[in-house]
Image (cartoon, grey):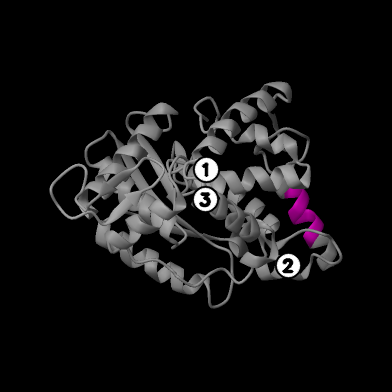
Amino acid sequence: MKCDRCDNKAVYSRKYSGENFCSDCFSNAILRKTAKTISKYKMIKNNELVCVGVSGGKDSLALLHILNQMSKTHNFRIRAVTIDEGIPGYRNEALEIVEKFCKKLEVDHVVYSYENLFDLTLDDALLQRDNEKISSCSICGILRRRALDYATKQNNADVIATGHNLDDTLQTFLINMISGDTNKIGWMDPDTSNNTLRKIKPFCEIYESEIVFYAFTNDLPFQSEPCPHMNEGIRTEIREFLNSLEGQRSGIKNNLFNSILKISQTVKDANYKEKTICSKCGQECTGKVCSVCQMVFRLKDNQT
């Protein structure tokens, strides 16, 4: 079987589109699709500094690899940012991988830790949950988002880019639906160009399986050890469910993603709230005290 775009041997078959690619054409297709997504949702503007959230996993390292290539031919700059949650034996390996990869690409790299920013590690926070029904992923997600906000401002960056892919978006949508937290669906619009602090997901239209193959075919180093807390939530079961559907009906993930875009805009319009400033930390939010401050103060109260 030959590549549909050249005469080389095909190594990847994109079932939902019926296309076959050699390694080089596949990599170029992912780069072009990422660039098209960035342009479509107005993610990056001329001469901006983009902080790229790099955890050490396949998605974030693939994003750094692609944005680094794009920055050489487009008018924007990048800087890698890693958040250290304080998970013993897990984050240390990732930090080493990211540091070496950034040196290879000649990209600046900075690290911020929960301990320095919030005076507690993720493990500390989990010990203080007491009897609260809140998952480790929920705690970590809220703290990581705030850490990335802080990193963006500290580096005088214009935007923060993360490696969330199409599968991540679908899983998050279903989690919000199952939990009844429908207001969050209004935050899932990829176009954040009107936000004060812009958070972008250039891989939001790309399947996770394609990111995996991109990482392997480009010999990208990434942490294979999963987070020790990854199976505490329902995300793994939802991932397997969606993969099963896609395996039987190619393209169903793309269809669901397009539906999410429409639903997100409707929910966003129906639940629009003027942004305010958190009275504790000064960050933008929709209430008097932001969700991060509420969580940190609650955990520290449990600690005492």
Q: Which residue is rendered at x = 81% and y = 56% of the image?
A: 298
The reply to whether callout 3 and callout 1 are in contact (CB within 8 Å) is no
Q: Which mark is residue 126?
A: 2
Which amino acid is tagged 1?
Answer: Lys
Task: From the image, state whether disc 1 or disc 2 is nearer to you.
Answer: 1
The range drawn in magenta is 293-299
Decide: is 198 above or below 238: above
Q: Amino acid at mark 3?
A: Gln
Asked if the residues shown at circle 1 and circle 2 are in contact, with their CB atoms under 8 angstroms apart, the answer is no
N-term mark: 3 or 1: 3
Using the image, tell me which numbered label, if any, was put on residue 36: none
Query: Was residue 298 drawn as part of the magenta stretch in this picture?
Result: yes
The circle drawn on residue 248 is 3
The one of 191 and 154 positioned closer to us in this rendering: 191
User: What kind of residue is marked 2?
Assistant: Leu
State the CA–CA distance, disc 2 to disc 3. Answer: 39 Å
Q: Is residue 46 above or below residue 175?
A: above
Q: CA distance from mark 1 to mark 2?
A: 33 Å
Q: Which residue is mark 1?
A: 253
Q: Is residue 258 left or right of residue 38?
A: right
Q: Residue at x 75, y 46 (%)?
A: 178
Pick the quarter of the image with the C terminus: bottom right
- Disc 1 is placed on an element classified as helix
SS category of the residue bearing label 2: helix
